[in-house]
């Protein structure tokens, strides 16, 4: 018998996890928009570049307005292009670590997610952005 689905929303930079939340159940557009506007937009800066795939939940008008308002830029990836999405590499590593930890409850999984995040090093983020062909500088 399987338990309830747990979804993780996250945002990363070339150095770290910027924001993350774990939720029971699946994610819809309203949930994603609330996460993005409450957790991500406040830490964006003028000139920041937000990269998202073109999934429908990412395309809310309020999200686009909020990004523009802070002076950041939004780039939607072409369809079916996970090779250009650094967060896909991040999730791959996190899921691999989570499998080894074997959490079986929501509380246990929440703790395991924290442990998995701690095992991701700053160099990993840098490498993922570079691998996905985003120009990164050492400053």
Image (cartoon, rainbow, N blue to C red):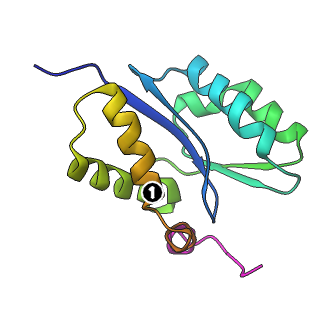
What is the x, y in percent for residue 48? 79, 55
Picture quadrant where residue 137 is located: bottom right
Which residue is painted at 10% across and 19% down in the image? Answer: 1
In the depicted structure, whether residue 124 falls above or below residue 72: below
Between residues 111 and 19, which one lies in front from this camera angle? 111
Magenta residues, dominant SS class: loop
What is the x, y in percent for residue 32? 58, 27
What is the x, y in percent for residue 74? 73, 47
- Answer yes or no: is residue 81 visible: no
Q: Which residue is mark 1?
A: 90
> Extreme left residue here?
1
Which residue is painted at 57% across and 20% down in the image? Answer: 31
Instruction: Label 1, secondary structure: give it.
Output: helix
> For residue 134: magenta?
yes
Between residues 2 and 88, which one lies in front from this camera angle? 2
What is the x, y in percent for residue 37? 73, 29
Image quadrant where one finds the C terminus = bottom right
In the depicted structure, whether residue 33 falls above or below residue 83: above
> Extreme bottom residue here?
138
Between residues 73 and 115, which one lies in front from this camera angle? 115
Give the magenta range.
Answer: 127-139
- Answer yes or no: is residue 115 visible: yes
Which residue is painted at 63% across and 28% down in the image? Answer: 35
Q: How many marks?
A: 1
Between residues 99 and 69, which one lies in front from this camera angle? 99
Question: Horizontally, is 102 left or right of 37 in the view?
Answer: left
Which residue is painted at 77% across and 38% down in the image? Answer: 41
At label 1, counting other C-alpha atoms closer than 10 Å, the crowd grade (few under 14, some 14-19, many 20 or more) is some
In the depicted structure, whether residue 121 falls above or below residue 139: above
> For residue 136: magenta?
yes
In the depicted structure, whether residue 138 falls above or below residue 98: below
């Amino acid at each position: 018998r399987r338990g309830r689905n747990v979804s993780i929303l996250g945002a990363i930079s070339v150095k770290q996890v910027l924001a993350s939340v774990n939720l029971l159940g699946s994610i819809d557009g309203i949930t994603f928009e609330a996460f993005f506007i409450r957790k991500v937009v406040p830490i964006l800066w003028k000139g920041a570049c937000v990269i998202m795939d073109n999934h429908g939940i990412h395309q809310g008008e309020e999200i686009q307005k909020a990004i523009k308002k802070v002076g950041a830029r939004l780039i939607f990836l072409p369809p079916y292009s996970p090779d250009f999405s650094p967060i896909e590499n991040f999730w791959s590593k996190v899921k691999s670590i989570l499998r080894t930890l074997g959490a079986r409850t929501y509380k246990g999984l929440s703790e395991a997610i924290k442990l998995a995040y701690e095992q991701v090093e700053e160099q990993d983020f840098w490498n993922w952005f570079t691998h996905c062909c985003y120009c990164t500088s050492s400053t």
